[in-house]
Amino acid sequence: MTNEEFEYVLNYFLHLLPEDVKHNYYYPYLSPSEIDEERKRLVGVLKKDYNSEIFYNLCKKCGGLARTPKAKQCRFCGFDWH
């Protein structure tokens, strides 16, 4: 999984997790290394338990990952699929 895909899953599919699973993610007392580990843990849980609900909005022309799951234009090649 690329860093881009990692951030995409974390930003757009975190809502799939129950509150008790993601509660540490929002606590400000975590150190930067603990935050990184928590982010990896959450993405791992998402990929394991909710993989069927995660989708990547890929460009039909170049295969690049769109900015959001609902985007209709590629940020890499400019292809528009409205």
Image (cartoon, helix red, strand yellow):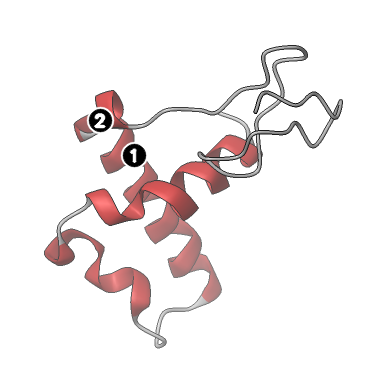
Residue at 77% over, 14% down: 62
Residue 18 higher or lower than 41, as above or below: below
| Few, some or many residues within 10 Å of mark 1 (<14, 14–19, 20+) | some
Residue 57 higher or lower than 14, as above or below: above
Label of residue 18 in the image: none
Give the quadrant of the N terminus.
Answer: top right
Residue at 48% over, 54% down: 11
Residue 67 on image: x %, y % = 65, 43
Which residue is farthest bottom?
Answer: 29
Q: Decide: marks 1, 2 in contact (CB < 8 A)?
A: yes
Give the quadrant of the C terminus.
Answer: top right
- What amino acid is at disc 2? Lys
- What amino acid is at disc 1? Gly
Residue 54 on image: x %, y % = 36, 32
| Few, some or many residues within 10 Å of mark 2 (<14, 14–19, 20+) | few
Residue on which disc 2 sits? 48
Residue 29 on image: x %, y % = 39, 87
Residue on which disc 1 sits? 44
Residue at 38% over, 60% down: 38
Residue 8 on image: x %, y % = 54, 44
Closest to the observer, 31 or 80? 80
Residue at disc 1, secondary structure: helix
